Amino acid sequence: MGMSTCPSTLRRRQRAAGAALPAVWLLLTLLVGGCTGSTSTSSAPSSSATASGAAATAEDDLQSGYERVIDQVLPSVVEIRSSTGLGSGVVYDGSGDIVTNAHVVGTDTQFQVLASGASGPLSAQLVGSYPPNDLAVVRITGDQKLQPATFADSTQSRVGEIVLAMGNPLGLAATVTNGIISATGRTVSEPTTAESPGATLPNAIQTSAAINPGNSGGALVDLDAHVVGIPTLAAVDPQAGGAAPGIGFAIPSDQVKRIADQLVASGTVTASGRAALGVRGRTVVDGSGQPSGVGVVDVTADGPAAKAGISPGDVIVAVGGTPTPSTEALAAVLADLKVGQTVPVTVQRGSARQDVQVTLGEL
């Protein structure tokens, strides 16, 4: 996928997906040498021949590396069928747990899973879903043995690193595309759809590996055959009205492991590692119809906002000096902050505007 256009929308890559936007406000979906003139002959190889041989060896090594990685990881990538469509998943452990996107499972609790080597579809049930990070776990029922994938330390992922995206795009089972890690540390936001309330994803991995509908929940894999992320979004070119080639996003494996471990253990998440204000709000608009802040609808008792004196009816217009004209903007700002960090929150209260210091809690 190339980088010829700057997208203004993002599209979720499961089925006919909606738009999404990164918090950086993209709006929301891989010699011939010359002769020297000497007439003497030598048994030593020429520099061009040596270079050509080295290039051929490197190409052979990369080819065999691709084949090895695909052979090792593809059996751990499954297709998940829900009542509204299909997506992908990655076998997480030896107990039949499979990690995928929350928007792949939607509101369903029962699924059909097509796994490598299985004679037919396998039944699975929901273990738990955590929409704020767009992650979920389903578990195969019965005694079927699946091959777990190995998850990488995504903090070590490097820009320029070769990666492969594995999944079931457009219903084409066990499809592999290749590319590189184009960037790390992106913050991207998903839209609200029938299957998901949307999510703001911090520290996402940007990749040039082709990601298409049905890739959601699959595997982004390095050449060590380790999963570095779960493909979730791809960009949309607003002018062309279709996918913007070469710009896709994956949830990093460290986040996947943090959330999946808790879902497997209890079906719920109590330690997301993400900062929160402890409010429920909605976007408010000004007299011209433009978003102007987040109106506080409810405040968590004894939560960070409540302790700072924020109450229902206040409008949050900035956090840490960054404007928050909408709920999406507020979520994006919080995604880049730390639990326990104290930041100024600017609120509009009637005709007065003031800053209050809030020590952030955990989402």
Image: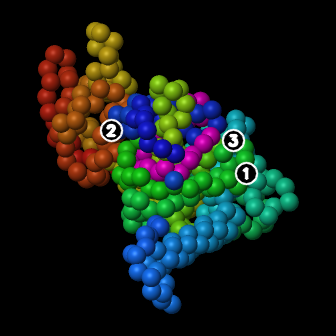
Mark 3 — residue? Answer: 170
Question: Mark 2 — residue?
Answer: 24
Q: Earlier in the sequence, mark 3 or mark 2?
A: 2
State the image coordinates of residue 209 (x, y, percent, origin top left): 53, 51
In the rendered structure, are the residues bearing label 3 and label 1 in contact, judged by CB atoms less than 8 Å apart?
no
- 248 in relation to 323, above or below: below
Check residue 199 for magenta coloring: yes
Labels 2 and 1: the sequence-earlier one: 2
User: Alpha carbon of mark 3 to alpha carbon of mark 2: how far?
Assistant: 29 Å
Q: Can see residue 270?
A: no
| In the depicted structure, whether residue 151 falls above or below residue 99 | below
Instruction: Left or right? Give the position of 267 relative to 159.
Output: right
Q: Which residues are magenta?
A: 190-213
Of 136 and 205, nearer the camera is 205
Q: SS of the residue at dot 3?
A: helix
The residue tagged with tag 2: helix, strand or loop? loop
Q: Residue 363: horizontal and vertical position, in percent?
A: 38, 47
Q: Main secondary structure of the magenta part?
A: loop
Residue ID for mark 1: 173
Residue 141 located within the stretch drawn in magenta = no
Q: CA distance from mark 3 to mark 1?
A: 8 Å
